[in-house]
Amino acid sequence: MVLMPPFAPLVVLAFLGTGAGVALTALGVLAAAIFRRTALLPWIAGLGVLLVLGYSGVLFAASLKSWERALGPGEWKYFCEIDCHLAYAVEGVETTPTLGPPLDPLRAKGRYRIVRLKTWFDPDTISPRRGDSPLSPNPRVVYVEDGAGKRYARIEAAERALVASGRTSIPLTMSLRPGESYETLLVFDLPDSALSPRLYVGVHGIEAFLIGHEDSPLHKKIWFRI
């Protein structure tokens, strides 16, 4: 099991606390300017700069100390959703040159790699006050990268063909209640030259400013072996 980010409650509090501190110093600068307390301006502004520099220093230090990991089948990668956690694991991988109806198949340029990704709302990660209300996952960034660093996006047409053939695949944005899970079929078209492919499932947004988060600058990623 890998938590992203580790110590999520403390990381979120540090981010919110720093943001609140910077906001207060900005208000302090504004108040000092309005009331013509010019002697206070450099001290208040300097405090704000120190807060930003201190937080940024810890952010980059945590990134520089990070290392890549590749999770195997059934190993969970957790994402903090503030009051709960969503976990992801690869349940299986298939390869095939075609998808869809036999008389009119959808042919891959290389070979289709079908990844069964499981999403689970871990009920042990919620607070007693949260209750059983559903959670809508934040948007996820999903791609495959090979050993040479080349990235491959999902092939949505192939995923639709897979579902049309009778396979079940739940969108990654589907809401869950505590304890619920579902599987999503992700399809990638990988050439034979794509050695050591690995799947990335992550986020992209304000998480870039959280200490120890893989989306933060220079931080190493947590992958899934496929």
Image: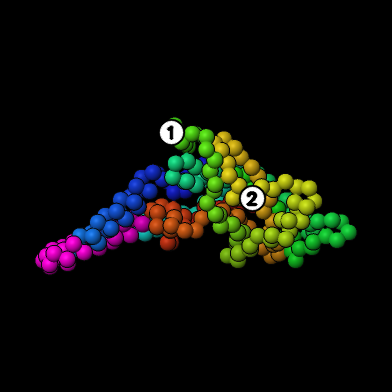
Q: Residue at x 69, y 60 (%)?
A: 156
Q: Residue at x 34, y 51 (%)?
A: 16
Say if the magenta span includes residue 25: no
Circle 2 packing at 10 Å, graded few (<14), some (14-19), many (20+), is few
- Callout 2, which amino acid? Pro
Farthest residue in the front direction?
34
Measuring from the top left, give residue 28's x and y in whole percent: 20, 60
Measuring from the top left, give residue 55's x and y in whole percent: 31, 57
Among numbered discs 2 and 1, the one appearing first in the sequence: 1
- Disc sitting over residue 171 in the figure: 2
- Disc sitting over residue 86 in the figure: none
- Callout 1, which amino acid? Arg
The residue range painted magenta reads 30-59
Left or right of 171, for residue 98: right
Measuring from the top left, give residue 200's x and y in whole percent: 57, 55
Left or right of 37, for residue 138: right
Measuring from the top left, give residue 42's x and y in whole percent: 16, 66
- Disc sitting over residue 129 in the figure: 1
Q: Secondary structure at mark 2?
A: loop
- Most prominent secondary structure in the magenta stretch? helix
